[in-house]
Image (tube, rainbow, N blue to C red):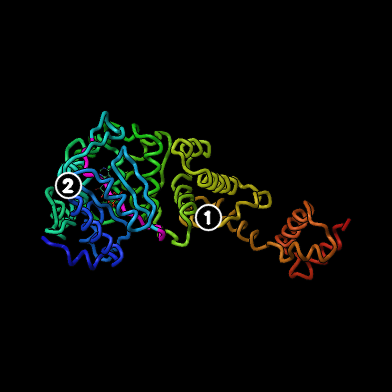
Amino acid sequence: MNLAKVLKQKISPKLHKKLEEISYLSNKLNLSSYLVGGTVRDLFQDGLDRYDCDVTVSGGDVKPLAALLQSQWKCELQSYPAFLTHTLQFSDRTYLDIVTAREEKYSKPAALPVVIRGTLLADLLRRDFSINAMALSLNKNSWGELMDPLGGLMDLKNKKLKILHAKSFEEDPTRIFRAAKFLCRFGFRLKKETEAALKIAIQEKIIAKLSGDRIRLEIEKIIKEREPFPVFKQLKQWRALEQIDPKLKWFPSQIFRGDTKQSFKERAAFYLSLMLFGNSVERVKGALEKLHFEREVQDRVLENLNLARALEGGESVLKLPQKALEKSALLFLNYTVQHIGKQRNLKKRWQEYKKWIQCRPLLDGNTLIQLGFKSGPLFKEIFRRIQIHKYGGKLKNLNEEIRFVVDNFRRD
Ligand code: ATP
């Protein structure tokens, strides 16, 4: 099957031109190049445009090719010799990986593999699922030809996810996370043997053997999905999440389409807060640390949970930390209250909290300076007192706020 036309339609003209240049230079260096992995898979999906892609090269050392491309495209080149990988990074933040066709040897389950140079077939055989193990020739005489020795296209058409050998999940347990991601993203099902292998791997508690960093990377990729909850739900159903920390409970039961305007850190904090609310704050803290989430994400999650706990415990809104007014906390709480409605106390407190937020002073620091006050800790106190009065139904407009300040605070 030749996919030259589809390739042209599906990827940007800029990227297509780059692939043609790779083809030309590979030919000159007596190398063979192939587009591989997710990019080839997505050529068969509707409405999926890709900006990144992986190129696998066989027949010799790939370094001279990467160096030539770098000088031709005047871009950044990062080399990872242990993984036989070269990443070309462009100013528009897109990138292209040029990788030597390779085999991987696993010294023990769940460890990182030792990478050695191999043939294209060996390179496809080491991949996670058949749908990700197709290649597309970029070579002069066979440009656009699909190489599909492992039946990826048939599985793609039948909406099936299939591993390539029985010990695949033991070898690399991150594939369990990837399986859940692809099943949910594409609406696929596991092939029978793959499902059996997955069950065995989970029974062997294989996820517990992964490092915190490797688990976090997979969790982060899931959070980047358009709909993360179904993926976490699937992982919970497989009893995979409980292996991350046996005492940590996950609640991915909500139905929510992510807010696309959120930054990744906000999004991560939001999803983690929702899923982990229900555990003690101490336990969540320990788990996030073990997984090495970025400090800012950890802090946001803990703030959200502390705030929710404080509200739930009947803490007066007047005593809550101001920092909790942050957008991600508000979104989290709003959502929690709506969807975990059983916590009636939380609901009542939340109404109070929203009212409290609406009582922020109209008066600002500049106005206080104009009134003759010197900026300092007193400002904070003034704002707080105004807010408390407004919360109690007083101070209906800016003039009343100004009068209140003039009557109650000294300027010296
Ligand atoms: P996405 O659309 O999420 O980017 P992708 O398949 O392109 O999907 P990557 O994580 O970029 O995902 O991986 C690129 C390719 O590398 C995959 O298509 C697959 O062939 C291979 N791969 C990635 N992770 C693994 C793994 N854990 N084990 C084996 N092969 C993998």
Vertical arrangement, residue 229 with respect to residue 364, above or below? above
Residue 179 seen from this side:
no
In the depicted view, which residue is nearer to us: 334 or 109? 109
In the depicted view, which residue is nearer to us: 62 or 384? 62
Vertical arrangement, residue 328 with respect to residue 245, above or below? below
In the depicted view, which residue is nearer to us: 5 or 252? 5
| Residue 117: quadrant of the picture | top left
Give the secondary structure at mark 1: helix
Most extreme residue toward the top is: 108
Please give the count of numbered marks on the rendered protein.
2
410 part of magenta stretch: no
Q: Any mark on residue 328, and which?
A: 1
For the point 74% across and 65% down, the residue is: 363
Q: Name the residue tied to disc 2.
A: 191
Residue 373 placement (x, y as % from top left): 83, 60
Q: Which amino acid does label 2 sit on?
A: Lys
| Residue 408: quadrant of the picture | bottom right
Q: Is residue 243 left or right of residue 60?
A: right
Principal secondary structure, stretch drawn in magenta: strand
Local crowd size for mark 2, using a 10 Å CA cut-off: few (<14), some (14–19), many (≥20): some
Residue 362 placement (x, y as % from top left): 71, 66
Q: What stretch is highlighted in magenta?
A: 91-104
Q: Any mark on residue 185, and which?
A: none
Nearest to N terminus: mark 2 or mark 1: 2
Give the secondary structure at mark 2: loop
Local crowd size for mark 1, using a 10 Å CA cut-off: few (<14), some (14–19), many (≥20): many
Residue 249 placement (x, y as % from top left): 42, 40
Residue 322 placement (x, y as % from top left): 65, 52
* Distance from Cα at disc 2 to Cα at disc 1: 39 Å
Q: In this view, does 331 lie to the left or right of 232?
A: right
Which image quadrant: the C terminus? bottom right
Vertical arrangement, residue 247 with respect to residue 312, above or below? above
